Image (tube, rainbow, N blue to C red):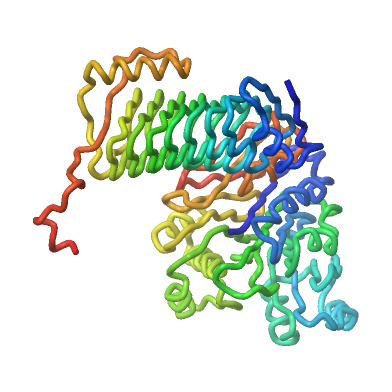
Amino acid sequence: MCGIVGLFIKNPKLESQLGALVAPMLSEMTERGPDSAGMAVYRDPNEAGCKVTVLAQDSEFDWENFEKSVHTNFSVDKFYVNQNHAVLSLSSSLDKVQDWLHDNWKDLSVTSAGSNIEIFKGKGNPADFIEQFDIKNMTGTHALGHTRMATESAITTEHSHPFSTGQDLCLVHNGSLSNHNRLRETLKRAGVQFKTDNDSEVAAGYLSWRLSEGDDLDEALNHAIEDLDGFYTFAIGTKDGFAVMRDPIGCKPAIMAETDDWAAMSSEYRAIATLPGAENARIWEPEPTQIYSWKRN
Amino acid sequence: MATIDLNKSTIRELNEKLQGGSSGDKFIVNNTVGKHALSVGLTEEVDVEINGHVGYYCAGMNQEASIKINGNAGPGLAENMMSGEVRVTGNASQYAAATAHGGLLVIEGDASSRCGISMKGVNIVVGGNIGHMSAFMAQSGSLVVCGDAGDALGDSIYETKIYVRGKVKSLGTDCVEKDMKKEHKEELAKLLDKAQMNYAVDEFKRYGSARKLYNFDIDQVDEY
């Protein structure tokens, strides 16, 4: 069992309250996933350069030294540390930044890359995660969150969702995949790299691979229906919005709701009930294998 | 008439109060916000009106009580109901009335997948559509659908009777269309009346078991 929440702001006036709106949703999904939590937030675009979130496994990691090094090597638009994560908004190409991180900072792993996305995740109770990362004060256009109840691989920060699946893309998953071991080997041969033995990371890797082969998101998800065996509700964050898809027999729950101000998805209605105007929202259950997406115009 | 506010009472307090009710008592429940396991395990002829959307397993194991939900219901509505009546004015999520032995479940909106899975005597009336794999291995009772039915309706069905007014996307294994005989029309008319659904009996088709899975077929020995 896991919990998924997604919130897409339609009324720009609410963008300043994104974190305040999505934090109670995530908190409400604690019982579905009490062992770790994560959140992808889309905000402060850096279209000219790139934005990267990095994670340090070592709690003693020297962020000051790292920040100095970032300033020495790049023109920095924004740099900030949030717990054991740091967000770098730089005026360089993404490839250059990723190569530099790879060559010089082996202790850091990249949780997200693109122009808008920031991904934070951590072990422990979702309430602690919300508190520590100050989720309530985050602004932005949309966010995806996940609470994890591990069923098939270890509980670590790196095993937590969301998983990055490409530039400004991320995946959260409720369910379990049964063919992930074999698929991981196939994807490795195609050049996809994995950090963990987690099944959801394989789904993320699969989508990254399909997108790199030229699929658009809908095509990649339609291929996923063919190639992924198991149960899933996926929510995929994109630069402009997010998409939701359930497995062919609709085994895992999902509920969607929309008002003039926002569109939301969750594993259960009680997460959506925390939103203003939820009682009068249009509410429906997504059909299996149908892709539902919201996009900023 | 007692009103219970779930902003003030816990779910356990609510259920204890409802379970402690005597025949004829009336209860109103407010501020449900999708909470789970509301109004479960009732055994007396009490009347419960729930205002708002409810989460998993509302009205589970109901006996005798009459429960009305003014909103939508999450997965497992009226699971294993034994008797009484449960009505939801909105939609119901997956496996409504799963394994239910008796009573009447009325869903005024749509029901999701696996509605009436393994039903064992309950009657279900759905005002709208039902999702895929509904009435899977359904054993007895009747399922009335005033809208359309999804894929694999009545797969591996036993003796449940299914009445569908709209289209059936596909029938499951061993489920076939059957004649509407006089006794079926009478039963359907009664159920529609009880559920307050205003449709003509002649608009419905009946589906049930071809009974080909009841006995082992020697021609299929190679399958094992």
Tell me where residue B118 sits by quadrant: top left
Res B220 → quadrant: bottom left
Residue B156 pos. (x, y %) = 28, 45
Q: Quadrant of residue B13?
A: top right
Q: Is residue B30 above or below residue A208?
A: above
- Taking A210 as reference, is A113 left or right? right
Residue A243 visible from this viewpoint: yes
Image vertical order of residue A291 relative to residue B125, above or below: below
Looking at the image, which residue sits at the far left? B219
Q: Quadrant of the C terminus of chain A?
A: top right
Q: Is residue B54 above or below residue B125?
A: below
Q: Nearer the viewer, residue A48 or B205?
A: B205
Q: Nearer the viewer, residue B35 or A38?
A: B35
Viewer can see residue A51: no
Residue at position x 43%, y 14% in the image = B193
| Quarter of the picture holding the N terminus of chain A | bottom right
- Which sits in the foreground, A41 or A89? A41
- Total labels: the figure holds 0
Task: State left or right for residue A105 relative to residue B88.
Answer: right
- Please tell me which residue is depicted at 74% across the width and 62% down the height of the picture: A118
Residue at x 63% of width, y 35% of height: B39
| Vertical arrangement, residue B54 with respect to residue B179, above or below | below
Q: Position of residue B74 (x, y in %)?
A: 58, 40
Residue A175 place in picture, x, y as percent: 53, 59
Residue B141: x percent and y percent?
36, 31
